[in-house]
Image (cartoon, helix red, strand yellow):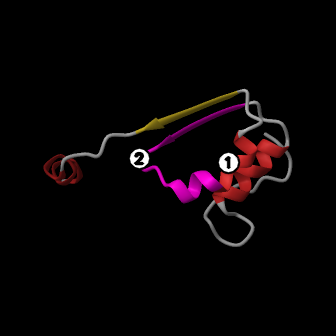
Amino acid sequence: MPEGLPDIIDNSEDKKLGAVLNQLLEQGEPVVRIVTAYFNHDGFAVLKNGLENAKEFKLLLGKEQEREFVIGDRL
């Protein structure tokens, strides 16, 4: 794991996800693979410059679950 990264990324001061990902990109991480349930244009804009240097970028978006499934799964 690259040096200087926090153990927990919780969006508190100095532990914001965008800052941590940009730090990884600055250290030369050539492959970026992101799995998320939501896509936000503003969040992508935070990473845009660093992603231009990535040799590979993959974004896997999850499918929103039906409400009945989510409620049933929690019981």
Residue 8 shows in the view: no
Image location of residue 5, percent across then percent down? 78, 52
Label 2: state its secondary structure: loop
Residue 26 vs residue 33: left or right?
right
Q: Which residue is mark 1?
A: 48
- Disc 2 crowd rating (10 Å Cα; few below 14, some 14-19, many 20+) is few
What amino acid is labelled 1 in the image?
A: Lys
Q: CA distance from mark 2 to mark 1?
A: 19 Å
Residue at image coords 65%, 71%: 12
- Disc 1 crowd rating (10 Å Cα; few below 14, some 14-19, many 20+) is few
Q: Which mark is residue 27?
A: none
Residue at image coords 74%, 47%: 49
Residue 50 vs residue 26: left or right?
left
Task: Look at discs 2 and 1 and give the one toward the viewer.
Answer: 1
Magenta span: 31-45
Is the residue 15 above or below the residue 37 in the image? below
Q: Which residue is mark 2?
A: 37
What amino acid is labelled 2 in the image?
A: Ala
Q: Quadrant of residue 26?
A: top right
Which residue extends farthest top?
55
Tally of numbered tags: 2
Is the residue 64 above or below the residue 8 in the image? above
Image location of residue 68, percent across then percent down? 13, 50
- Residue 14 in magenta? no
